[in-house]
Amino acid sequence: MNFVNEDAILIEVLLNEQRKAGKHWVAFDETIPRLSKDDLTCFSSVYDVKQYCFENSIGKERYTFCTIDKMQGAVEVAMKKIFRHHK
């Protein structure tokens, strides 16, 4: 997963807020080359996230999902790359 550099911290904040609100899953369009926080939608149940992905995967859009923990791990890796690049 790639992220819009400026949004990496905002995504981290969003995911923390969503987890505190009881959500565990995050859906996104896997065809978007660089995700921003507006590209993510969080859910509390696996049923809801699967239904959302199914209903929104039309045309060239391909929605998928993962746990908030997995997404946060990907964001952390991306942020390390950003900071390493700016040194």
Image (cartoon, helix red, strand yellow):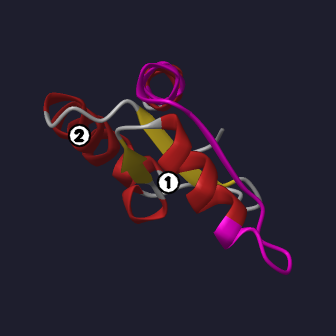
Dot 1: what SS?
loop
Residue 35: x and y, percent? 55, 55
Residue 7: x and y, percent? 36, 52
What segment carries the magenta color? 55-75
Residue 23: x and y, percent? 30, 35
Q: Residue at x 24, y 44 (%)?
A: 14
Residue type, label 2: Gln
Count of labels in the image: 2
Q: Residues within 10 Å of mark 1 (few under 14, many from 20)?
A: some
Residue type, label 1: Val
Residue that mark 1 sits on: 4
In terms of depth relative to the viewer, which is nearer, 72 or 50?
50
Q: Is residue 48 above or below residue 19?
A: below
Residue 25, visible in the rendered structure: yes
Which numbered disc, 2 or 1, marks the residue closer to the eye?
2
In terms of depth relative to the viewer, which is nearer, 7 or 27?
27
The span from disc 2 to disc 1 (Cα, nearest Å) is 20 Å
Residue that mark 2 sits on: 18
